[in-house]
Amino acid sequence: MPVNAKWQSAPADFEPNLSTASIRVLYFQPDGKMSVIGCIVYKRSGHYTIGADGQTVALGNWHEERGRIVARSRLVYRPVQKIGEKLPGPWVNEVLTSENGKLLLKGVQYRRVPDLDKSAAELMPQAISPKP
């Protein structure tokens, strides 16, 4: 999850301990599979969950190379496709570096948030795994 996510607090009379952020979650599995999830994350009393609405999901793979993470993914799910969009989309290659115990991608620092592991894993559909 991005280190500097922009959180918005829910109205105090609705749910005083709730904040939300629209972010990109990077989820790396030990077997080399990965997902990139565009979603709303809910933060309640210091605990985080991925919201079920409006997500985009890109699936791919990753490996370590010379101290960097080389990732390859493509968009496989969007709740409402853009006009003319075909899914799965084209492959996107990205290189992440490590900086002060955090990952850096395109100028954005990401940190690990263990609370998100379960909901991110649930978004790794087995039936539509990407093929290289």
Image (cartoon, rainbow, N blue to C red):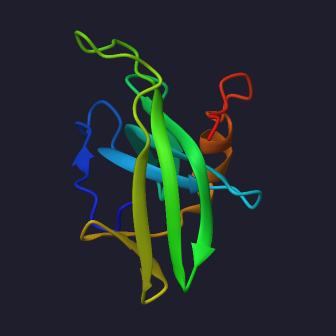
> Height in image: 23 above or below 101?
above
Q: Residue furthest bottom?
A: 100
Residue in front for this viewpoint, 114 or 69: 69
**Which quadrant of the rendered structure holds the C terminus?**
top right
Q: Position of residue 3 (x, y in %)?
A: 34, 68
Q: Position of residue 79 (x, y in %)?
A: 40, 15
Q: Position of residue 43 (x, y in %)?
A: 43, 49
Residue beneath the point at 43% across and 78% down: 97
> Height in image: 14 above or below 16?
above
- The quarter of the picture where residue 59 lies is top right
- The quarter of the picture where residue 75 lies is top left
Q: Position of residue 90 (x, y in %)?
A: 40, 34
Residue beneath the point at 31% across and 30% down: 14
Relative side of 81 to 47, left or right: left
Residue beneath the point at 51% across and 66% down: 70
Relative side of 71 to 13, left or right: right
Q: How many marks?
A: 0
Residue 127 visible in the snapshot: yes
Residue in front for this viewpoint, 61 or 41: 61
> Height in image: 79 above or below 93?
above
> Height in image: 56 above or below 103?
above
Residue in front for this viewpoint, 44 or 115: 115
- The quarter of the picture where residue 13 lies is top left
Relative side of 118 to 56, left or right: right
Q: Residue furthest front?
A: 132
Residue beneath the point at 54% across and 85% down: 67
Residue 17 visible in the snapshot: no
Residue in front for this viewpoint, 117 or 65: 65
**Which quadrant of the rendered structure holds the N terminus?**
bottom left
